[in-house]
Image: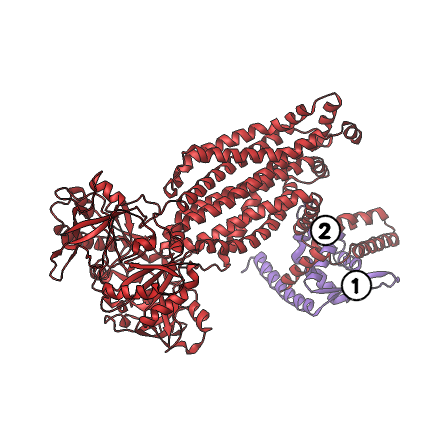
Chain colours: A purple, B red
Amino acid sequence: MANREPSKADVLQGTFDLMVLQTLDTMGPQHGYAIAARLEQVSAGALQLNMGTLYPGLMRLEQRGLVKGSWGTTESNRKARFYALTAAGRRELSKEKQAWDRMTTIIQALLRGDA
Amino acid sequence: MPLLREWIHRLLGTLRRGRRDRDLEEELRLHIELAEEDARRRGEPVRAARLHSGGASQAMDAVRDQRGWPWLHSVASDLVFASRQLRKHRTASLAAVLSLGLAVGATTAAFRLLDAVLLRTLPVADPDRLFVLGWNSMTSQGEPDYRDDFDYPTFRRYRDAVGANGDVMVVGTSGRQQLRFENGEPEPVNRQFYSGNVFPTFGLQPVLGRLLTPSDDVTPGGHPVAVISYDYWTRRFAQDPNVIGRSFRIGRQPFEIVGVAPKGFTGTEPGRMADLFIPAMMNAQALNAPGWSWFRIWVRPTGAASLEQVRELVQAQLARDRQDTVKNFPSTTPGPRIAAHLSEKIILAPAGSGASGPQRTFRRPLFILAGLVVLVLLIACANVANLLTAQAITRAREMALRVSIGAGRWRLIQLVLVESALLAICASLVGAVFAWWAAPFVVSLLAQIGEPIRLVLDLDWRSVAFSLALTLIVTVLFGTAPALRASAVEPLGAIKGHDDPHAHRRLVRSLIGGQMAFCLFVLFVAGLFATTLRNLSNRPLGFESERILLLDINRPGERQPPHVWAALTDQIRGMPGVESAAFATWAPLSENRWRWPVYVAPRQAEEVSPYFLGISLAYFDTMRIGMVGGRDFRIDDTPPTLDREKRPVPGVGIVNETFSRIYFGAQNPVGRQVIVRQDQEMDVPMEIVGVVRDAVYYDLREPMRPTVYVPIEAGNQRTLFVRTAGDPRVLAATMRREVSKTYKDTPVLATTQSTLIRRQVVRERLLATLSLFFAVLALLLAAIGLYGVLNYAVIQQRREIGVRMALGARATHVVKRVVTEMLSPVGVGAVLGLALALVFGRLVESILFGVKATDATPIATALLTLAVAAVLAALPPAIRAVRIDPAQTLRSE
């Protein structure tokens, strides 16, 4: 009975994967809320991921074998699911980064108009 | 790769649900808690933090959608629901599955037969560009005829005429032959003569050794080589690679096996599997014999040559040939005969699916049976549609509930379609099992003749594809209407319990009407075929066919004079268990015939030439054909014939009653002289010495024809008739041994006269047996359908009936109410069925015997049968209606 519109995750998908993978790479294994908080902080509040985008996205990354989730405890001693980068995730991250760099160089050159 | 992994995970997620919901809820709850804590720490309102984390239940839905495939998941849950529904209505579902299964099975079996006999293309290169030659001609009776058998001199002329424009091939009609390996027993095989270019043109590669090449087809009688089929190699030699180089004999002629044909190639005649391929040159006697037809001519246009070009070349040659023959016609030949002879037309028929006698014999019957089976399938579909519609009505409330909580229209259609698909899948499983059993059974029906019919019936992708396609079509056919009805439900009305029963009844009534119409038609056609078989089987033969053993003996070389054959016959006659014995040129109904025009001077020859048969002494005694007048042959009687210098030598003959009536009317023919016009238009006088009773000769279906029996002459091939005291088949082996004691290396084929008669009615038996089976099936299905609908109506109107009975309605009134509703569709259906019978009955007329499609009896029988079935089907619901206890029904609601 699911007649839904395309979710925000679909729109964000390209950058979402890169952002989450990069966050996990710099900060090590994190739980969902910490990832969202980190992204919000880095973007100075511009990027607010709601749960309906975050958790399906994490599940997709997990299904693709880029991250691996496991239950652990937070600093405040609460049970939480931590996501860690896998070897495949690391490879994917460097690939995506290069692609992003290439893309931004092209776009910048284009915008400067001196190509 | 990651994408593939995701799909696999999602598929597993759909089936196994992957991570549990509780897990996910836990994760989301933590998220919210942490967000709230952060907000408190920063002094922001907790509500805002919650808002921008988003709703937990929406997040849950999104995660669930990511976990599996929502659509697949919905189908899976529909499946679970559907199987529960089917189990709930166990009897109705079982009836639906069984009836649909039987119908699908019968259809698949019919398709497999059609495919094996008519449709499947030969496993050769470019089958679309293979053609078989035939020509339209007139029989001497003036009926149009199509023939595709040729003699070798004609082949040579056509081959030269086509020249470089095409490959012209000799493709022998397969023949039963005895062969003998080294010192073994004689074994029957099917052999085909091929010209040397057949295998190269077909583009076939040997599995072992080599195939026949043009260099194997040069010198008459000079290429004693043979290629065996893969099937024969497997059956007879267990795929022994040392088979190459082995030798065998056919008669006295030795052959050497040089190769094994590729797997799947079983010759070019569907219905007959060839075991052995021999160069055409090895049929040396036939190469220069005009009129000895023993093969078909196949053509493949080469290069740029078009089909029409090739046809015109052959047509031109045919025209030249006919001009030559017409020159030799006697001056008395009527003009229309000559014109008909000259106007014969060459036809090039597609041969990609092979060309065979069984194909021609069974094409029409198989299509008729396929038509009947489709009607049976439709009847079964109507049953299932009725069932589903009835269920959809009872479930209107459930559907309405689904709509009101937000299910889309498509979602409801999917639900009902999944249910019908489940039914269809169950049914096609039943059908597959049935078809798997039925197709070989039908082949065994075809094969009740001395010469077995063998078909390639592997369960290949075509029949699987057919079965699947059929299932799909059937699903759509019977699933769509109820699905649309269900989805068009109006929530408010349905929940309140108000629906429109008339729409439902209209559909059900038209379905019942259709069922009755088709059922009547199937019954009618089955009745016609059954009557035909009975008439043919009971037709008076004029001789006693039981306990007659026939021995076909073929002595190559010098023609054996009658006294040699007579000595052999005497030897047989002296054996235990033999009552009497005789011999003749061939047996009646053996598909051989010989005709010469006969006239009584000074009149012209009759339009229909009489049949001739050469017989020995004691033939009439052995066959129990009674003498009417005159005398039997004596040892010194001779036939009318031509001597070595082609001069007429008068002789004697015995005629049958029909001959006597046509040529002499009421006069006594004994002692009279007639003129027999023999080969090369030579007239030979013949004195009639006796008259015998009529007996069938060539075709069981034709009326008694004038027949002349003459004393038998010398010959290579004769049939011995042995009347035995017991079962003739028991003596067959002994007789064969006895004959081979006298004649070494002589092939002897033993059969019985009864077998020949059965072979004549094999097509009718097939049609009668299968159409009766379909008729019973159709009747059963239609009765189940009617019963189901009436029964359902009674259950639906239980309350109303209860009220009426409580108010004093009589039982007859109640029954009338229940039954009359379905009376009109049954009546309309019967009328439609009658119309069908009248329109399409004509299509089968040509294969009927002793009954016409317009006769009253078959239609009346079909109507009566249908009426009885309808009454029987209506009885239980009627009884049920009468037995309704008003008090109980009223209390239950």
The mark tally for this picture is 2
Q: Nearer the viewer, residue B320 or B277?
A: B277
Where's residue B64, x and y in %? 73, 52
**Element under label 1?**
strand
* Label 2 residue SS: helix
Quadrant placement of the N terminus of chain B: bottom right
Badge 2 sits on which subunit?
Answer: B
Locate the C terminus of chain B by quadrant.
Answer: top right
Res A82 label: 1
For the residues bearing labels 1 and 2, Cβ distance under 8 angstroms? no
Q: Is residue A50 left or right of residue B47?
A: left
Mark 2, residue position: B62
Please, which chain is the residue tagged with disc 1 on? A
Residue A9 relative to residue B371: left or right: right
Q: Is residue B649 left or right of residue B849?
A: left
Neighbourhood count class around disc 1 (C-alpha, 10 Å): few under 14, some 14–19, many 20 upward: many
Q: Position of residue B544 (x, y in %)?
A: 37, 51
Residue at 75% x, 21% y is B807
Where residue B741 sits in the image (x, y, percent)?
34, 72
Residue at x-position 66% and y-position 24%: B812
Tell me the mark number nearer the camera, choosing from 1 and 2: 2
- The amino acid beneath tag 2 is Ala
Rendering coords of residue B105 (x, y %): 54, 50
**Can you tell which mark lies on residue B665?**
none
Do discs 1 and 2 belong to a common subunit? no
Which residue is nearer to you in this view: B415 or A64?
B415
Cα separation between marks 1 and 2: 20 Å
Between residues B536 and B114, which one lies in front from this camera angle?
B536
| Residue B762 located left or right of residue B561 | right
- Which residue type does callout 1 highlight? Phe
